[in-house]
Amino acid sequence: MALDALPRLIPTGTCWCGCGRQVGLGSFFAQGHDKVAEGALLAARYGGSVAQLLHAHGYGAGHSVTAAAVSEGAWDECSHSGCDYVGTPTSVRTHQKRAGH
Ligand SMILES: [Zn+2]
Ligand SMILES: [Zn+2]
């Protein structure tokens, strides 16, 4: 699915993890609760298994989810020849500084 097909979401003033806490304007989550929600979804739908999550979305050893992140334009590849690092644009820049290339 193309990322531009994702619906536009609007924060509601209450944390989306379901804890009921009020959050600031423009936020979906109380601090750290995005990770709580992510873990809870993984537990509730995939038994806490990232392998199950990947399989359910058609990814795995033979169909790279990291390549999909790059081809959707959400992640970048390190441009250094012979380096296979991929990640968010910010993490690629951090990687390149640390790796010295
Ligand atoms: Zn919450
Ligand atoms: Zn690199």
Image (cartoon, rainbow, N blue to C red):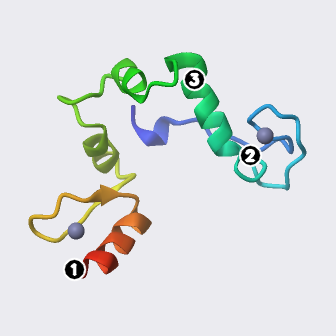
Which one is earlier in the sequence, the residue at label 2 or at label 3?
Answer: 2
- Horizontal side of residue 89 vs 44, given as left or right: left
> For the view shown, which residue lies furthest in the front direction?
48
> At numbered mark 3, what does the secondary structure look like: helix, strand or loop?
helix
**Disc 1 designates what residue?**
101
Which one is earlier in the sequence, the residue at label 3 or at label 1?
Answer: 3
- Figure label count: 3
Give the residue type that dot 2 points to: Phe
Most foreground residue, 42 or 80: 42
Q: Residues within 10 Å of mark 3 (few under 14, many from 20)?
A: some
| Residue pictured at 17% horizontal, 28% vertical | 62
Q: Residues within 10 Å of mark 1 (few under 14, many from 20)?
A: few
Give the residue type that dot 1 points to: His
**Disc 2 designates what residue?**
28
- Horizontal side of residue 3 vs 61, given as left or right: right
Name the mark nearer the viewer: 2 or 1.
1
Tags 2 and 1 touching, CB below 8 Å? no
- Based on the displayed image, in which of its 4 quarters is residue 15 positioned? top right
Q: Where 71 falls versus 52 (above or below)?
A: below
Q: Mark 1: is the Cβ under 8 angstroms from ligand 2?
A: yes
Name the mark nearer the viewer: 2 or 3.
3
- Horizontal side of residue 44 vs 85, given as left or right: right
